[in-house]
Amino acid sequence: MAASAPSVPRLDENALIGIWVETSLWGTYCIIYAVAMYVLFKKLQQPVILATTSTFLFMMGTAHVSLSLSQLLDAFIRIPNPEPPLYSILYWSNYASGKATAKTVLYDTSVFTQDLVLIWRLYVVWSRNWKVVVFPLLVEVAHMATAYALTGLLARPGSNIQSPTIVHFGPVGWVLDLAINICVTLAISGRLWYMGKQVNDIAINRNRYLTTILTFVESGAIFAAFTIVMLTVYETGSVLALNLIDISTQLAIMTPLLIIARVGIGMVHGLPDAVSFAYPSQRSMGTHSHTGYEMGSFATKRPTDNTVIISKEYGTTVDDVSTHKGTTIV
């Protein structure tokens, strides 16, 4: 009896499904981007940092999904004549092709930008204390050095995802990225929780920053959870790992804008009413002038020179988030 031929992984099916999910996420991201830009430009006066990074991430995601479409055309439409055996399957095994390499670079850059935005938020919430972000920045440099180095290894002709070097160092980038996302998110949440416990000048029965904390954690958990899934799949030796990068790219660019969009349209915990943003106000108190911030039906002493009101009902704030006169969203 003749030995049965070894089965070939259906890389074509994996790619089709992965790119279909990626395209769906990109369509969702277009809506989130539009909402975020509306929030930034209509409710803020000078949203330079967030608008610039958001637009850059949108361009990265659009370029990535465009390359995915071009790959689909190459694999299933622009077939050489005569057609080589298993052409549509073997096409996806060429990780060194120009389009595959470009997509990986876009993924690395998108994740890098997303992490920098997260670290910037940490810097802002911790009252612009640069000492707080030194270690996260060093870890991020190590993370991206590893990621770009592995991309370079995959770009070599004849590269193999199962090579010992890639197998041993491949998970390092994802582990470092998880460390950045989880630790920085916890540091931001912890700072907000502490600030909420310190501000007790309004009689409410909940931490004033709980809404903000939950929004940060929930939005960041999406990308972190998917990174864990990718790492797990990669460790099992499955060829699905690189297909999941297509999906992860869109999640990476979506996370920073999701926070802006949710806060801007009130899709956060404890926000039954429209979002209200703070503005400086002078109140006369006897013979003294008191500077405060309007918060729906009540005002509070200003904890710092710059405050953003996230919750109209509870007066949730984020201290010292912008040097711009007015407000911003971290």
Image: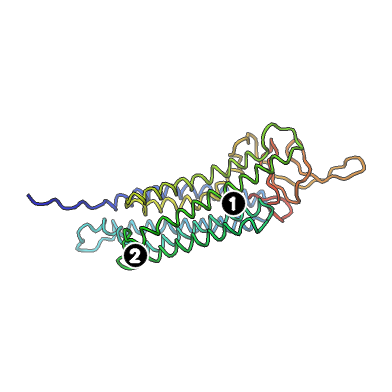
Percent across and percent down for residue 90 are 26, 58
Asked if residue 143 lies left or right of residue 244, the reply is right
Please name which of the two marks, 2 or 1, marks the residue nearer to the observer: 2
Which label is found at residue 147? none
Q: Which residue is mark 1?
A: 37
Q: Earlier in the sequence, mark 2 or mark 1?
A: 1
Q: Which residue is mark 2?
A: 97
Asked if residue 298 lies left or right of residue 140, the reply is right
Residue at 61% in and 40% down: 266
Q: Residues within 10 Å of mark 1 (few under 14, many from 20)?
A: many
Percent across and percent down for residue 85 are 19, 59
Q: Number of callouts in the render?
A: 2
Q: As drawn, which residue projects farthest toward the top?
A: 205
Q: Is residue 276 above or below residue 330?
A: above
Residue at 49% in and 54% down: 177
Q: Nearer the viewer, residue 116 or 69?
A: 116
Q: Nearer the viewer, residue 28 or 235?
A: 235
Q: Nearer the viewer, residue 73 or 241?
A: 241
Q: Is residue 193 above or below residue 177?
A: above
Q: Quadrant of residue 148?
A: bottom left
Give me the C-alpha separation between circle 2 and circle 1.
35 Å
Identity of the amino acid at label 2? Answer: Ser
Secondary structure beneath label 1: helix
Percent across and percent down for residue 74 are 31, 60
Percent across and percent down for residue 308 are 69, 47
